[in-house]
Amino acid sequence: MKLLKSLFCALLLSNAWSANATTDSTGICLLPASDSKRSKAISVKYDQGQMLKTNDFLKEDGRDLNYRAMAVKFAIGVPGNSYQNLDCHKPYTGLGFYMADFNESRYFGHPFSIFLFHGGSLAELSQRCHLQYEWNFGYSTNWGHYDPIDAPNNITIGSSENAHIGFNLFFEWQLTRNFDLKIGGGFTHFSNGATHMPNKGMNLWSPMIELAYRWDDPSYIFDHTRLHSDSLRALYPELRTPEDWEKRIRHDITFTVSKRQLYMDTLGSGLPNKFYDHTFRVFQLSYSPMYKPHHKFAYGPSIDLVYDESNNSYVRKETGADGFAYNRLHLGATGDRFQLGLAARGELQTPYFAYIGQLGYDLIHAASYSSRFYQLMAVKVNLTPHLYGTCGIRAVAFSKAQFIYWSLGYSIDQLLGK
């Protein structure tokens, strides 16, 4: 806290104040075309809430599910004179550091995480009050977790390293030119995505409060609802607006690499429990012809070919030639490790990321332990005009993770005209 106070004091004493933006009689900021500053902000966020009772370990009588968390965040926006600043309602992204303190710390430890976040405005209730959204995705560590000897009942957290996924919805008040106050609520999920078993995952809900210091913001008190394409063209004739968009088919080819563990059927095997510590390889090749009628969204089918080494594998206790008993893993036949799925895919584009959602069904499906109906959520980053990377999770039953994955893809545009 001393470090944070010192940082805020340094910011207040610096020359971070920018000149006041001029406005017309309607309150719309008239930004000079040469003003390409990006707004920046540093903030402190505090949560205090509860773990949700989503598995048997958290449902046990006497379990104290309360927790507290604090995050320090640095955010940066798009250039003030960019069309994205107006069209996407002042989007921003940044990097944060998160620390959690659980009342049940003897089981869950003292985790912390580094996360990316992205947000923007959903609605402007007044010139100074906005309804905002923000999502987080990051890497967390230092968890107390399942151990067959020391913590055999902790099926909530299966490893010391987990993904950090969160979503917040809040009201933002512009207190002064530089200070914002944010009050709302959020949902946070921690899980290793089936890379280690058990993996029930932890779900948190809490109210939140956040204080932010902002500087280099040329679009202070921006009323987006009064800005339309005609006024944008008058202000910034060099900018491309949605009317300039040419409809297209975008052909996406994506290659995915991942790994997973599996709950093993140990009935009659002589094994002490079903959490057999073996990591299986997963590869996926997808082709998606996406219709993109607008610069903000695209949709289309996807064909997904998956090689999952865990399909039809099993483990049992066997006696070796030396007379000792061993746990032996048996993989399924090579042909049984492949799955072929057909899916409906949608994509929402923002200045920094694209969000992908997918619902699919396996036409060829060898895995007897899971459903043919699968779901996928991912975040996509354009690395070049054609090359992109994604990070996401594939699940069944909208709740059970199959694997977390990283992908690299290539897209080819087929223009259809305006």
Image (cartoon, rainbow, N blue to C red):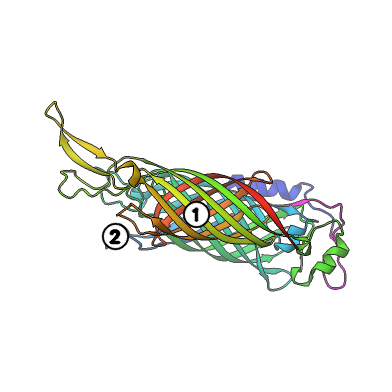
- For the residue pair 318 and 127, the one nearer the viewer reads as 318
Q: Which residue is mark 2?
A: 56
**Residue at 47% across, 52% down:** 304
Q: Assign a secondary structure to mark 2.
A: helix
Q: CA distance from mark 2 to mark 1?
A: 37 Å
Farthest residue to the left: give it: 323
**Region of the chain picked out in magenta, as a range:** 20-44
- What percent of the width, then of the height, locates residue 212? 65, 56
Mark 2 residue type? Asp
Q: Observer-nearest residue: 32 or 416?
A: 416
Question: Relative to 343, does residue 27 appear above or below in the rendering?
Answer: below
Q: Secondary structure at mark 1?
A: strand
Q: Residue furthest top?
A: 322
The C terminus - image quarter: bottom right
* Dot 2 crowding, Cα within 10 Å, few <14, some 14–19, many 20+: few
Residue in the foreground of this view, choosing between 197 and 317: 317
Q: Earlier in the sequence, mark 2 or mark 1?
A: 2
Give the residue displayed 84% in from the left and 68% down from the top. 230
Q: Say which of 355 and 295 sits in front.
A: 295
Q: Main secondary structure of the magenta part?
A: loop
Dot 1 corresponds to which residue?
303
